[in-house]
Image (cartoon, grey):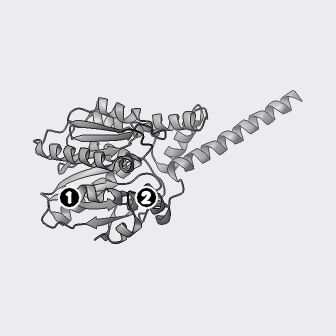
Amino acid sequence: MVYTVLVAIVLVVILAASFLTRFGFRQITQMKLQTYENIFDYLEKTGIYSRERFETLDKKEVKVTSQDGLSLSGYVLDTDPDSKKWVIIVHGYTVSSHVSAQYVDMFQQEGFNVLLIDQRRHGNSEGTYTTYGYHEKYDVQTWVNWLLDHYGRDITIGLHGQSFGGGTVLEYLSIAHPNVKFVIADCPYSDLTELMRYQLQVLNKIPAFPLLSLIDRQLERKAGFRLKQVSPLKAVEQSCLPVMFVHGTEDRYVPTHMSKDLYEHKPEPKRLLLVEGAVHADAYSVDPKRYSEEVHSFIREALATPAAKSCLPSI
């Protein structure tokens, strides 16, 4: 009888672990994507942007092919043909380039043309799994090369990423092209292992051991990467490009201390903007005036500073 009970308990534990592993893997790599309507319902609720403004933007859809053969989609806003300044805006998890449109005016005011991109598996881009910058940094490089091919080898490029997009642009620092002159990371994670441990233990009240290691094995087997292979903290430590970190002080999804840690580990030049009262991915809508002023000041400073030698060889 006791043996039967023990066997039953073991089977229940195994089944529960298997379910949680599959569920965790899907949540990390294949969470349900938000629709066009969902995104603009949110933006209009915040009062920061509207679908009408997006639909009237002077834009054209463009396609590129990733290094591993995926079709990637984006919108080009080349409204200033005399400008040699471009910014690529990278969205967060489960959304798309539509949410990035809220930042268009901020960059156009500084004379930038804009490229809004859909990350792999999001929007109109192909892909099966989200890899938090492991593959996506090479997608950004594909877009950088596309801009250089179409608008000249003498253009200046900046990157702006929010949440997962922030992690992507920070991961990109390890392979940054010389024409990329600055990066802005809004509410990024510093280390994927630490983020997933935090979200399991703190947000979901689930012990990280042994679930995190089981999920990690699934990531390697199905999505082709391990958690330890995504660490923006390691990327920023080796980069001398100007980087601005932005975070809301009330962010509970990606804790605020992650941007503080990134800032502390990043060599100069760098800047940190903490927006009081802002939750995750909400800093711009909470204080758009200060956000824009800080970004404009950072960009002017970054572009006025003589190019420093990268801490890693650029390509």
Give the residue displayed 14% in from the left and 38% down from the top.
309
Q: Which of 105 and 175 is in front in this view?
A: 105
Seen from this angle, which residue lies furthest right? 1
- Dot label at residue 112: 1
> In front: 231, or 300?
300
Find numbered disc 1 in the image and state the secondary structure of the residue it sits on: loop
Residue in the foreground of this view, choosing between 248 and 146 = 248
- What's the residue at 48%, 61% (across, down)? 41
Q: Which amino acid does label 1 sit on?
A: Phe
User: On the image, numbered disc 2 is attached to which residue?
Assistant: 43
Whole-angstrom CA distance, mark 2 to mark 1, is 23 Å
Residue drawn 40% across and 32% down? 257
For label 2, count other residues whose C-alpha is less than 10 Å away and answer few (under 14), some (14-19) or many (20+).
some
Residue 315 can be seen in this image: no
> Disc 2 marks which amino acid?
Leu
The image quarter containing residue 208 is top right
SS for tag 2? helix
